Image: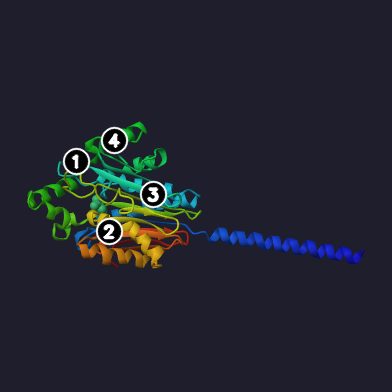
């Protein structure tokens, strides 16, 4: 009888230990689920000698604020979609970037904006193109994704939709900045109708100040391993004829897929459209089995650059690896990971 009892005790003790081991295993799993956010604030001829130390400090501070905003969402168990949207809002509300408040001016002197967002879990996406007076175009893009079957709305129709869904609008004055006005005048003075194409497509040879694209983008992976990507922009200074860039085009300026990675682009949009740059990175990762870093590098240097395009891309892969690359002098960029890493960079190195 005593022996039987001893066996029962040993059995129970064994079960308890096994159970405890299971729980700690689970805990390790939870701790291991990494989350991260990466952002860009545009690429271009961004060199130390062209930026005052005050401006550099302001940009760094805003990038950090944007990163912190998205990171907090992820840390609290929120979705990567909410994280990228809220992060983009911070940059759209700042005059420092070419999106929302600080968006560049088209040839009529107006801010005409594009934005897109994609959910890597469902492959659902939303975009708005050529919209005026919407304070946060990324919010309109998110509503397109969440509320209707269409993926991309443009111009007046997109604005009617945004009004219906109570998206915030602002007067022209809200978007006006002296800096953007001066940039437009400088470009206009230099380029007449005949040289217009050069002004739009060959910014490398244009004014230093116009070398910055300034588009904003964010990619995040949340605690559930879901990836989301988003991009918002005013496009290119002096653009005409309701030109639409890569930023609102899913697969060019923005792409997210839980099976591979999330990407946001910035640069001469025409070349990112022609190479379907963001989706192409995902292809390199999936089918060529390249690392995310190499995939981005390949698309920028072997596909975009030979065509004459310039710019950069940021991304996060399904294993929460963060990567970026660009063929311009600099790119405003940063990332924050659950591993504790927090990096903000502006110049090449
Ligand atoms: N890619 C954007 C566009 O072509 C511009 C930018 O990145 O600043 O519209």
- Foreground pick, 165 / 90: 165
Query: Crowding at label 2, few (<14), some or many (≥20) Cα neighbours within 10 Å?
Result: some
- Between the residue at mark 1 and the residue at mark 4, the CA separation in whole angstroms equals 18 Å
Residue 220 appearing in the image: yes
Disc 1 designates what residue?
A: 110
Secondary structure under badge 1? loop
Q: Which mark is residue 275?
A: 2
Secondary structure under badge 3? strand
Sequence order check, earlier mark of 3 and 4: 3
Q: Residue at x 11, y 47 (%)?
A: 185
Q: Which mark is residue 157?
A: 4
- Between the residue at mark 3 and the residue at mark 4, the CA separation in whole angstroms equals 21 Å
Q: Nearer the viewer, mark 1 or mark 4?
A: 4
Q: Residue at x 76, y 64 (%)?
A: 14
Q: Nearer the viewer, mark 3 or mark 2?
A: 2
Query: Crowding at label 3, few (<14), some or many (≥20) Cα neighbours within 10 Å?
Result: many
- Between the residue at mark 1 and the residue at mark 2, the CA separation in whole angstroms equals 29 Å
Sequence order check, earlier mark of 1 and 4: 1
- Name which quarter of the figure residue 151 lies in: top left
- Foreground pick, 263 / 60: 263
């Amino acid at each position: 009888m005593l022996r039987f009892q001893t066996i029962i005790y040993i059995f129970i003790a064994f079960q308890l230990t096994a159970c405890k081991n299971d729980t700690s295993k689970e805990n390790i799993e939870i701790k291991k689920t990494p989350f991260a956010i990466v952002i860009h604030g545009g690429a271009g001829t961004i060199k130390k000698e062209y930026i005052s130390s005050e401006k550099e400090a302001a940009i760094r501070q805003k990038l950090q604020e944007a990163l912190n905003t998205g990171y907090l969402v992820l840390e609290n168990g929120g979705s990567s979609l909410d994280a990228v949207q809220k992060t983009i809002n911070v940059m759209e509300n700042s005059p420092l970037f070419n999106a929302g408040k600080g968006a560049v001016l088209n040839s009529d002197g107006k801010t005409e904006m594009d934005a897109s967002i994609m959910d890597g879990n469902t492959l659902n996406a939303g975009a708005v193109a050529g919209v005026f007076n919407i304070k946060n175009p990324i919010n309109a893009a998110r509503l397109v994704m969440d509320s209707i079957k269409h993926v991309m709305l443009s111009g007046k129709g997109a604005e009617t939709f945004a009004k219906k869904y109570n998206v915030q609008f602002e007067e022209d004055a809200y978007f006006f900045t002296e800096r953007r006005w001066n940039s437009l005048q400088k470009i206009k003075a230099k380029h007449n109708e005949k040289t217009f194409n050069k002004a739009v497509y060959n910014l490398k040879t244009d004014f230093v100040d116009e070398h910055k694209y300034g588009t904003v983008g964010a990619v995040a992976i949340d605690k559930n391993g879901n990836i989301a990507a988003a991009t918002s922009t005013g496009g290119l200074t002096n653009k005409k004829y309701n030109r639409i860039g890569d930023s609102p085009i899913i697969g060019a300026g923005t792409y997210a897929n839980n099976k591979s990675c999330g990407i946001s682009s910035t640069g001469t949009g025409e070349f990112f459209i022609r190479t379907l740059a963001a989706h192409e990175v995902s292809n390199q990762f999936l089918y060529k089995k390249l690392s995310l870093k190499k995939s981005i590098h390949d698309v920028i240097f072997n596909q975009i650059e030979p065509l004459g395009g310039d710019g950069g891309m940021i991304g996060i892969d399904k294993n929460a690896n963060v990567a970026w690359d660009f063929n311009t002098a600099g790119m405003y960029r940063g990332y924050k990971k659950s591993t504790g890493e927090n990096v903000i960079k502006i110049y090449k190195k």
